[in-house]
Image (tube, rainbow, N blue to C red):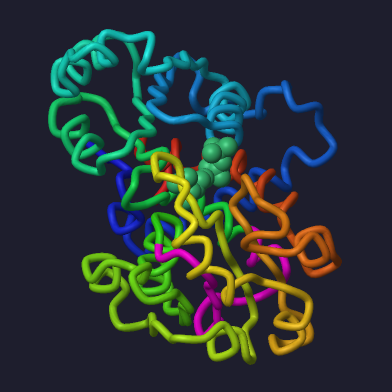
């Protein structure tokens, strides 16, 4: 059973296979309408069940469209309208859904819940974001970087702001694919030791935005307040020196690009000038969620890697 709870489930080779497949499949359907099924329809006869305990635009729609383009179908479930939302256990939900669908994607808070889902499901389980990680997002980010003709080994990625779930998956990817991460995070908001440990020594946490961005190939950030976190003025104040603005971008490499998983807060973690400027790849990054999900699904079903 192939679960995709974190990038290390696929490992470096699996991740490379997912990226190569996504680039090939994206190229093969260039110019097609979005609803047209890929020529090989590799998930014909398959249904993906998606459980959301948190809001989503990209993950929800990209997974739904991914399954359709692969020739399968999906069912989207809001946890609040399920018995899960009134106390039915994750384990029981996993057993029941396994009888109906061929794979389960879950977005939740506590990472232990996706592990519990995987432990009790008899179909593949995919992590669609937890408080600890967001592996599917980083597959899309890596695709976006590769599309620019950049190579991953030796690449320098600067992260600014919160040491959150998205950073944790970037750190893990760096360890698997041999690139370097410089994370500039304020005291008290640095990535957890467990996340750093998965990065195989390729991530360094620094104290200033300038130290991280100088000479970087990629500059990335995310919202300062993640889903489920209280809106705290103290946190926003601590984050302010880590805002990505145009002056900071000039210290990166001249051909550096800006990434943000979205949703964004212009004027907080990034200025409008940068996120809507020529170095920003955010719309390609968002579209690549679709292409990434397709190859993640194919990996889960043992079709690649
Ligand atoms: N980036 C991302 O996961 O977006 P959604 O929250 O809209 O799914
Ligand atoms: N760190 C953000 C990512 C959203 C896609 C959150 O968890 O809310």
Q: Position of residue 8 (x, y in %)?
A: 30, 58
Residue 90 found in image quarter: top left
Q: Nearer the viewer, residue 245 or 13?
A: 245
Q: Is residue 160 magenta?
A: yes
Q: Which residue is pictured at 21% across the width and 11% down the height?
A: 96
Numbered disc total: 0
Q: Position of residue 236 (x, y in %)?
A: 52, 61
Q: Is residue 158 magenta?
A: yes
Considering only vertical position in the picture, is 38 above or below 45?
below
Residue lying at the far front of the rendered structure: 233
Residue 282 visible: yes
Q: Position of residue 230 (x, y in %)?
A: 41, 44
Q: Which residue is pictured at 25% across the width and 36% down the height?
A: 114
Query: Left or right: where does residue 144 sit relative to residue 209?
Result: right
Q: Nearer the viewer, residue 81 or 46?
A: 81
Query: Left or right: where does residue 7 sit relative to residue 185?
Result: left
Q: Nearer the viewer, residue 131 or 29?
A: 131
Q: Position of residue 16 (x, y in %)?
A: 46, 61
Q: Which residues are magenta?
A: 144-163
Residue 294 visible: no
| Quadrant that contains the N terminus | top left
Q: Nearer the viewer, residue 29 or 8?
A: 8
Considering only vertical position in the picture, is 208 above or below 145?
below
Query: Left or right: where does residue 18 sit relative to residue 247?
Result: left
Residue 192 found in image quarter: bottom left
Q: Which residue is pictured at 58% across the width and 48% down the height?
A: 22
Q: Which residue is pictured at 38% across the width and 26% down the height?
A: 53
Residue 275 found in image quarter: bottom right
């Amino acid at each position: 059973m192939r679960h995709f709870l974190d990038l290390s489930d696929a490992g470096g080779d699996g991740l490379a296979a997912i990226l190569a497949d996504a680039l090939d499949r994206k190229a093969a359907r260039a110019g097609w309408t979005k609803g047209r099924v890929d020529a090989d329809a590799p998930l014909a006869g398959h249904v993906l069940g998606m459980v959301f305990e948190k809001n989503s635009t990209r993950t929800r729609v990209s997974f739904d469209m991914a399954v359709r383009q692969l020739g399968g179908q999906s069912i989207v479930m809001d946890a609040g309208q399920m018995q899960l939302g009134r106390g039915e256990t994750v384990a029981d939900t996993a057993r029941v859904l396994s009888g109906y669908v061929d794979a389960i994607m879950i977005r939740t808070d506590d990472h232990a819940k996706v592990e519990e889902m995987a432990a009790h499901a008899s179909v593949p389980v995919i992590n669609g974001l937890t408080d600890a990680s967001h592996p599917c997002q980083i597959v899309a980010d890596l695709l976006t970087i590769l599309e620019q003709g950049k190579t991953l080994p030796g690449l320098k990625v600067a992260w600014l702001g919160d040491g959150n779930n998205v950073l944790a998956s970037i750190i893990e990817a760096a360890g698997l694919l041999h690139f370097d991460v410089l994370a500039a995070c304020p005291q008290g908001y640095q990535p957890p030791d467990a996340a750093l440990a998965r990065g195989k020594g390729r991530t360094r946490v620094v104290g200033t935005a300038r130290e991280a961005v100088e000479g970087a190939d990629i500059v990335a950030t995310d919202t300062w307040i993640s889903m489920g976190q209280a809106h705290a003025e103290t946190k926003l104040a601590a984050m302010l020196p880590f805002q990505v603005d145009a002056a900071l971008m000039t210290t990166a490499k001249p051909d550096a690009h800006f990434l943000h998983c979205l949703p964004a807060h212009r004027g907080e973690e990034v200025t409008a000038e940068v996120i809507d400027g020529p170095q920003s790849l955010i719309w390609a990054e968002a579209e690549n969620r679709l292409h990434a999900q397709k190859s993640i699904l194919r990996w889960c079903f043992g079709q690649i890697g």
